[in-house]
Image (spheres, coloured by chain):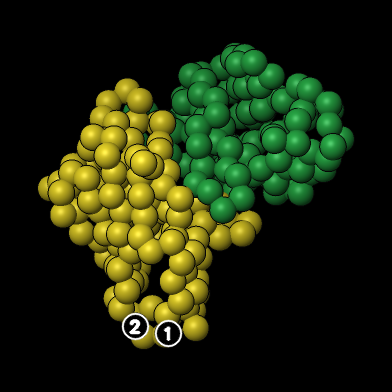
């Protein structure tokens, strides 16, 4: 089984709808991240969490919220989806301390907002 | 100016060629440098990791860091069709900081 899983893998929604993307990991890592990937822009950090009680905004957090339900679970919500949130979304994890730079990514969620 | 810049390609080479992928960056505080490989419809995976300036070799892959020029490179020798992927450079200032990714270079190795 994959160490980092994301559900759903694909989602089509309409403008104004609230949706949630979920991420689970079995690596036992403390740190979890949500990125979005757009052509030409690469990976941009939305939110990150260094432990269950720690939530931090990334460079593009507007329009998004997150919830860290447990060490292994980190959810991303789009409160009111808009078309420019159409993108590929990745969850990632990393270990605490000196190897934080090694991130382990899930398979991604492809989101289309109509 | 973006913190990390990378030629998006696409880059197309024949099998067996030597491939050079490059990134430039603007912040001299970056100390750790990584290359991630991303196959189509997959998440990125770490390929190489280096700390500070110098070279690191792993099989057919060599990562090179020149901090004085703020320039990092990934060389792939004897390229194979299985190397066809998008390669993202990434860097970080300290182990407690956020990783900054380049936009990625798309590589196709033609049999």
Q: Look at chain A in the picture and name its colour.
A: yellow
Mark 2 and mark 1 in contact (Cβ < 8 Å)?
A: yes
Residue A99 in the image, given as x and y percentages of width and height: 35, 25
Residue at 41%, 31% in the rendered image: A102
Q: Name the chain under label 2.
A: A
Residue A111 in the image, given as x and y percentages of width and height: 46, 69
Residue A85 in the image, given as x and y percentages of width and height: 46, 71
Q: Name the chain under label 1.
A: A
> Does residue B48 lie above or below A67 as drawn?
above
Answer left or right for B69 relative to A75.
right
Give the chain coloured green. B
In the rendered structure, find residue A17 and report the number of the disc placed on it. Answer: 2
Secondary element type, mark 2? loop
Q: Examine the image and state in which quarter residue B82 appears.
A: top right
Answer left or right for B105 relative to B41.
right
In the rendered structure, find residue A14 and report the number of the disc placed on it. Answer: 1
């Amino acid at each position: 089984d994959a160490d980092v899983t994301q559900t759903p893998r694909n989602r089509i929604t309409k403008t104004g709808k609230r949706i949630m993307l979920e991420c689970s990991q079995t690596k036992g890592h403390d740190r979890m991240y949500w990125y979005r990937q757009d052509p030409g822009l690469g990976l941009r950090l939305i939110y990150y969490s260094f432990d269950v009680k720690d939530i931090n905004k990334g460079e593009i957090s507007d329009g998004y919220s997150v919830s860290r339900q447990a060490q292994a679970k980190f959810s991303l919500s789009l409160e009111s989806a808009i078309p420019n949130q159409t993108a590929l979304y990745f969850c990632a994890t990393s270990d605490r301390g000196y190897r934080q730079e090694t991130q382990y990514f899930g398979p991604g969620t492809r989101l289309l907002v109509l | 100016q973006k913190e990390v810049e990378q030629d998006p390609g696409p880059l197309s080479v024949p099998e067996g060629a030597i491939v050079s992928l490059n990134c430039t960056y603007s912040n001299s505080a970056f100390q750790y440098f990584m290359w991630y490989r991303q196959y189509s419809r997959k998440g990125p995976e770490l390929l190489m990791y280096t700390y500070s300036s110098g070279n690191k070799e792993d099989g057919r892959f060599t990562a090179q860091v020149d901090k004085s020029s703020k320039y990092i490179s990934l060389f792939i020798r004897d390229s194979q069709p299985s190397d066809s992927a998008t390669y993202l450079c990434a860097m970080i200032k300290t182990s407690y900081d956020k990783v900054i990714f380049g936009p990625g270079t798309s590589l196709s190795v033609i049999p």
